Image (cartoon, rainbow, N blue to C red):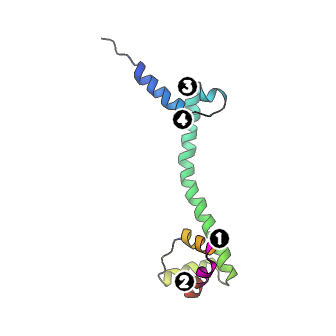
């Protein structure tokens, strides 16, 4: 008996074309063009999910550095002192506290000085 592939191939093509929805020109309608574009897009998405983590950490460090310098201490000294005093706050939380609750951040800085 002959094997028919139409159901599987239609499913495969629909999956790719659904991912390519909104792309410019033939990239959204032509299967061959869509495969190329979707594959590249997925590679970028995978790479940038990791890059995003790096960029946010860098942003938090910059914000904390700016906040602690206003209070007369360097970022390096501040983080070192936090570790010594066993104050376990993530850079994410420290940056948020520094921006939104300066009085609380002042107390944290005083605690480590």
Q: Is residue 77 visible?
A: no
Q: Residue visible at 57% across and 32% down?
A: 36
Q: CA distance from mark 2 to mark 1?
A: 18 Å
Task: Rate crowding at label 4 as few (under 14), some (14 to 19) or many (20 or more) other CA atoms within 10 Å.
Answer: some
Q: How many marks?
A: 4
In the picture of the structure, the residue carrying the numbered disc 2 is 81
On the question of residue 1 being in view, the answer is yes
Label disc, if present, on residue 63 of the rendered structure: 1
**Magenta segment: does it hold 105?**
yes
Q: Nearer the viewer, residue 99 or 47?
A: 99
Choose the circle earlier in sequence order: 3 or 4.
4
Callout 1 secondary element: helix
Question: Going by the picture, which residue comes out furthest to the top?
Answer: 1
In space, the residues marked 1 and 3 are separated at their CA atoms by 46 Å
Name the residue carrying label 3.
Answer: 31
Query: According to the image, label 4 marks what residue?
Result: 19
Residue 49 lies, in percent from the top left, at 54, 51
Q: Position of residue 30 (x, y in %)?
A: 59, 24
């Amino acid at each position: 008996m002959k094997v028919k592939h139409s159901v599987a191939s239609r499913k495969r093509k629909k999956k790719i074309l659904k991912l390519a929805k909104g792309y410019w020109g033939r990239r959204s309608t032509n299967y061959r063009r869509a495969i190329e574009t979707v594959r590249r897009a997925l590679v970028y998405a995978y790479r940038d999910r990791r890059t995003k983590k790096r960029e946010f950490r860098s942003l938090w460090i910059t914000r904390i550095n700016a906040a602690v310098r206003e209070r007369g201490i360097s970022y390096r000294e501040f983080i070192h002192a936090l570790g010594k005093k066993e104050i376990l706050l993530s850079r994410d939380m420290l940056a948020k506290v520094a921006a939104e609750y300066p009085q609380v951040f002042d107390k944290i800085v005083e605690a480590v000085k």
